[in-house]
Amino acid sequence: MNTYKQRGKRPTGLKRSSNEEGQHLETKIQRMMKNKEAIPAEAELIYTAREDGVLPAYDIRADRFELAITGHDKIAKSKIAKSEHRAKMEVVKAEKEAEKTTEKKEQGQASSE
């Protein structure tokens, strides 16, 4: 019968975590029942007024593809606005540099006369 060769342990750069072991759920519930502690709210409760209906973000039947498209459109518009702003800033910077060069030329002509 063939047996596989076992390799020895090699040192690695990984370090072992020294975390403590957590409390079992059953013991936590028993303790909370015994001490009559309140259950901690770990997630927000989502309630809406009946006339408002179910919000699309929390509706399990909502078409999330449409929500994704609208979100993507918002992101795309913000990126376009940023790039347009950068382009405007470059134009303003170029105009300022052009003004400086014309002023230097005018000063050079005035001093040579």
Image (tube, rainbow, N blue to C red):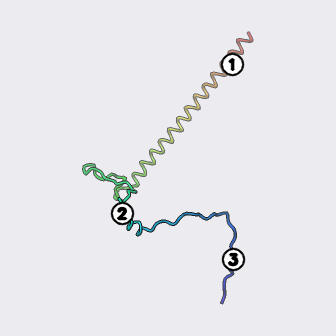
**Mark 1 or mark 2, which is nearer the start of the sequence?**
2
Tell me which amino acid carries mark 2: Asn
Q: Residue at x 66, y 85 (%)?
A: 3
Tell me which amino acid carries mark 3: Arg
Considering the image in quadrants, where does the C terminus appear? top right
**Mark 3 or mark 2, which is nearer the start of the sequence?**
3
| Residue picked out by circle 2 | 35
Would you place residue 52 above or below residue 7 in this image?
A: above
| Residue picked out by circle 3 | 7
Quick one: 68 or 6, which is closer to the camera?
6
The residues tagged by marks 2 and 1 sit, at their Cα atoms, a distance apart of 83 Å
Determine the secondary structure under disc 1. Answer: helix
Find residue 59 and name its label: none
Q: Residue at x 64, y 25 (%)?
A: 97
The residues tagged by marks 2 and 3 sit, at their Cα atoms, a distance apart of 52 Å
Cβ–Cβ below 8 Å for labels 3 and 1? no
Would you place residue 10 above or below residue 112 in this image?
A: below
Determine the secondary structure under disc 2. Answer: helix
Tell me which amino acid carries mark 1: Lys
| Residue picked out by circle 1 | 104
Residue 86 is left or right of residue 29, and the answer is right
Q: Nearer the viewer, mark 2 or mark 1?
A: 2
The residues tagged by marks 3 and 1 sit, at their Cα atoms, a distance apart of 77 Å
* Residue 105 position within the rendered picture, expressed as x and y whole percent measured from the top left: 69, 18
Residue 90 picture quarter:
top right
Considering the image in quadrants, where does the N terminus appear? bottom right
Cβ–Cβ below 8 Å for labels 2 and 1? no
Quick one: 86 or 28, which is closer to the camera?
28
Number of dots carrying numbers: 3
Quick one: 14 or 25, which is closer to the camera?
25
Determine the secondary structure under disc 3. Answer: loop
